[in-house]
Image (cartoon, rainbow, N blue to C red):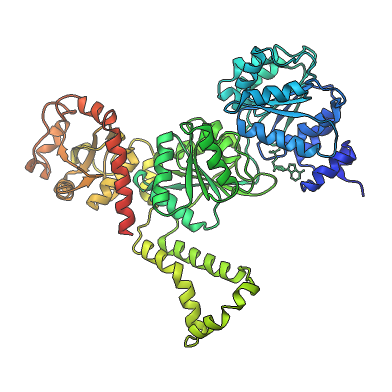
Amino acid sequence: MNNPFIELGIRHDIVNAISELGFENPTPIQEQSIPVLLTGSNDFVGLAQTGTGKTAAFGLPLLELLDFEENYPQALILCPTRELCLQITNDLKNYAKNMSNVHVVAVYGGASISDQLRQIKRGVQIVVATPGRMLDIINRNAIDFSQVQYVVLDEADEMLNMGFQEDIDSILSTTPEDKKTWLFSATMPSEVRRISKKYMTDPYELTMGAKNTGNANIEHEYYVVRARDKYAAFKRIVDFNPEIFGIVFCRTKIETQEIAEALIKDGYNADSLHGDLSQQQRDKVMKRYRERSLQLLIATDVAARGIDVNDVTHVINYSLPDEIENYTHRSGRTARAGKTGVSISIINSKEIGKIRQIEKVIGKRFIKAEVPTGFEVCEKQLFGLIHKVHNVEVNEQQIDQYLPRIMDEFADLSKEDLIKRFASIEFNSFLAYYKDAPDLNVPEDTRASREGGERFPRTGTRADFTRLFINLGSVDGFGRGDLLGYFCNQTGLVGRTIGKIDVKGVYSFIEVPNADVDRAFASFKEADFKGRQVRIEISADGDRNESRGGASNYKKREGGSRRDGGSNTRGNERSGSGFRDFSGKRREDRGERRKRY
Ligand code: AMP
């Protein structure tokens, strides 16, 4: 039977090379794009995720179309990152390993330009480049693109996100008018649509799945927890998946570093990847991750661009991305090459709306998952261990010499005792860690009320409530729902009895039934939040209530509602200079929680 790649029009020596790479059947994008691109006569737009086999989809036709007897640049591939640039170069060299005189050069920043210039000078047919360094080389008049026939814009949306539009314009202006342009993008924002209009005539368009949709092999899950429980929930999810090989996305470099540091301290195999690292440091982290000596890579969106690592089992959105499109990029790091994967989002109840928006964009429903209980984690870990013991490869030769001594040592133990002991080695530490671990899921009852936007008492009138001031607000990570949860936990009051909640920057207001005011004050008497004393007081606006419930025993706040120091300067102080202190406290808090488990 013919090899399906031969049937698509790829020659034998290339097919032999890709067979060695394990390519037996073309992926859907290869099946559909190769015949079109092999004609060499179309501009082309391919909407496809990373990991779908895009590189071969454009790489194999290029190897068929170019004239390798000649040593001038005939194809230019532009891509957003150094990692992707190296990956594409390497893939092309592998596909062409049985062909002669194929010269592919990788041009990217952060490496010696003179080596790259030397390679170009020796003669190349395919240049794979990141835009910045490419432009640098063009500006040195060190390359002639006047005979380029094909330009590939790979991960075009990423290149535009990274602000390469002008560089791309300048680079393309040095290539001939009649070249063919092939554009690949995971998403189709209007900017990509614009460049496809600008550079292409009547392109052949291929959409794998719906526009902006993620890979069908990815399962999307979300967990709703209180903001302050996020790290603990994250660790539980990781512990519940002992074989996890994941990428964890954070919004900021600081968060990335904090999470990685905390994880390392807690004994996890993790490291961070962000823009403040030097290229060398980034390469080192990536190498460890690729080799799987790292289990969790904690990354920012920008740093993770172009990461092409197969077999990533989970993408974890520790923080949801600001741009919904970044969600597609993030989740596309898993379920590559036909595998399956899970994209997890750990959110607080305020963010459920964002999940619904993402669902609309990717055209897939998220599954609402529950953070496993301590017991479930222990059980999972135990059976993970049992499975490992059962499947471990025994080195008979090496172990033989020790067997008599081992047998002797265990002579007094029954099989059952022995099994118990082996299992306990790891299990004990998990049991100790998760002893009395609390439920981290936000209770359904509270969550439902949080989702409903502004709260208002279900029974009773405003007159039945006292408006309390509390010195916690959004800078402490509270939304309305989180504050309700925190307040109810602290006071033991039921969420639905609480009235309106108004969260400001450094303080908030909560309406409490008059009958519960005493209880609220008693509960907050010695309360502290991340090392800071929590105070509640009756709001000045609560005058109307004061004469009615037990509120009159307490001092009314004076001088307007924002009265910490009489102005909002305190708020500024806390969100500005206090940041280090704030984050430091968060770490301590994590430590304390760890110890308590
Ligand atoms: P790409 O989207 O080009 O980065 O490819 C993702 C992964 O799929 C890479 O590891 C490729 O080696 C692999 N791959 C691409 N095409 C095929 C194929 N036809 N059969 C098996 N694996 C493939």
Name the residue located 21 percent from the left edge and 46 percent from the top edge. 528
Position in image of residue 85 (x %, y %) = 66, 31
State which quarter of the image contains the C terminus.
bottom left
Identify which residue is drawn at 11% across, 41% down: 548
Count of numbered badges drawn on the protein: 0
Q: Position of residue 541 (x, y in %)?
A: 17, 30
Task: List the single residue furthest toward the bottom.
Answer: 412
Res 220 seen here: no
Residue 172 position, x and y percent, is: 69, 15
Image coordinates of residue 515 in percent, x first then y, are 16, 48
- Give residue 137's quadrant in the image: top right
Q: Quadrant of ligand 1?
A: top right
Question: Is 539 located above or below residue 585 in the figure?
Answer: above
Query: Which residue is pictured at 40% across the width and 45% down the height?
Result: 261
- From the viewer's perspective, is 101 left or right of 302? right
Identify the residue at horizontal 45%, vertical 64% (top origin).
Answer: 378
Is residue 420 left or right of 135 when viewed as pictured?
A: left
For residue 567, above or below residue 489:
above
Q: Nearer the viewer, residue 444 or 98?
A: 98
Q: Is residue 375 visible?
A: yes
* Left or right side of 584 for 328: right
- Front one among 441 and 310: 310
In the rendered image, which quarter is residue 196 located in? top right
Between 293 and 22, the one lying in front of the other is 293
